[in-house]
Amino acid sequence: MKCCHFMLDITQLLSKVSFAAQLSSSTVADVMSASIASVIATLSKYQDKKTTPKLKDLGEANTFKGETLTGSGNIENTIMNVTQGLLSSLHGRFSDMTSGLLHALRISSFKFWPASKDEMQNFGNEELRVLVQHFKPTLQTANVILDEVEMEWDMLKSNIRAFRRTPLMVLLNGDLINLKEEFALSTPQLVTGFSITRCKIL
């Protein structure tokens, strides 16, 4: 029974990675950093503590839903073997998660973009070189001018930074309103306002 509870925790943990990878909105960087890195950290914690949340809930009970539990009850070796096997597999399959191509792909997700101007200046330069080198044949086939890639990258960062500074303005009854300051994005008033606007347009 303890093995069942342990494997349920493991299955739920791994299913989160699978779910994140299937989301159309997820980038490689999102899956690598937010999901796989989190799973590795959690598996390491299971390994160190030799227990999981559901095992803690089960405790040392001798019965489960009226059924008597048998066996030694000590599954520490199982926990160590399973977690070590999974960690070895994840590290082996995603060895370049903290460097190399997979790490370079993090610039494709705005979650990893810095907020300050100083950090933005050099952000992604090294990652861009890694990506260009890896996809060089494909880029050349598509007639991309490789000498201009770095310049266009700097222009992209500049434009995105400018866009971030631009407030979301709307003309309402003759008054220019900054929606970011007036409403939180999830307020009922804002939802109603956009619904009314949509109806008028239609």
Image (cartoon, rainbow, N blue to C red):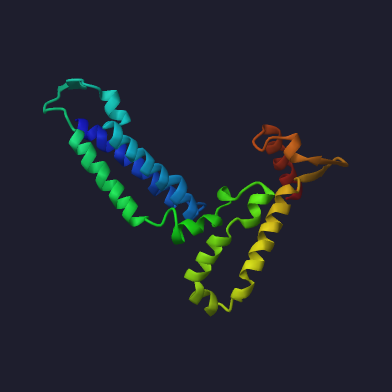
* Left or right for 117, reference 95: right
Look at 75% across and 40% down and name the residue there.
179
Name the quadrant of the N terminus: top left
Towards the viewer: 173 or 106:
106
* Left or right for 101, reference 45: right
Residue 142: % across, % down: 55, 77
Residue 184: % across, % down: 68, 35
Which quadrant of the figure has residue 62?
A: top left
Task: Name above or below for residue 127 compared with residue 87.
Answer: below
Q: How many marks?
A: 0
Towards the viewer: 70 or 140:
140
Residue 111: % across, % down: 56, 48
Towards the viewer: 55 or 80:
80
Residue farthest toward the right in the current orientation of the protein: 174
Which quadrant of the figure has residue 53?
A: top left
Look at 76% across and 35% down and name the residue there.
182
Task: Name above or below for residue 1 compared with residue 103.
Answer: above
Look at 33% across and 51% down and name the residue there.
90
Which quadrant of the figure has residue 38?
A: top left
* Left or right for 28, reference 128: left
Residue 87: % across, % down: 30, 47
Task: Name above or below for residue 41 compared with residue 18.
Answer: above
* Left or right for 180, reference 43: right
Look at 18% across and 21% down and name the residue there.
63
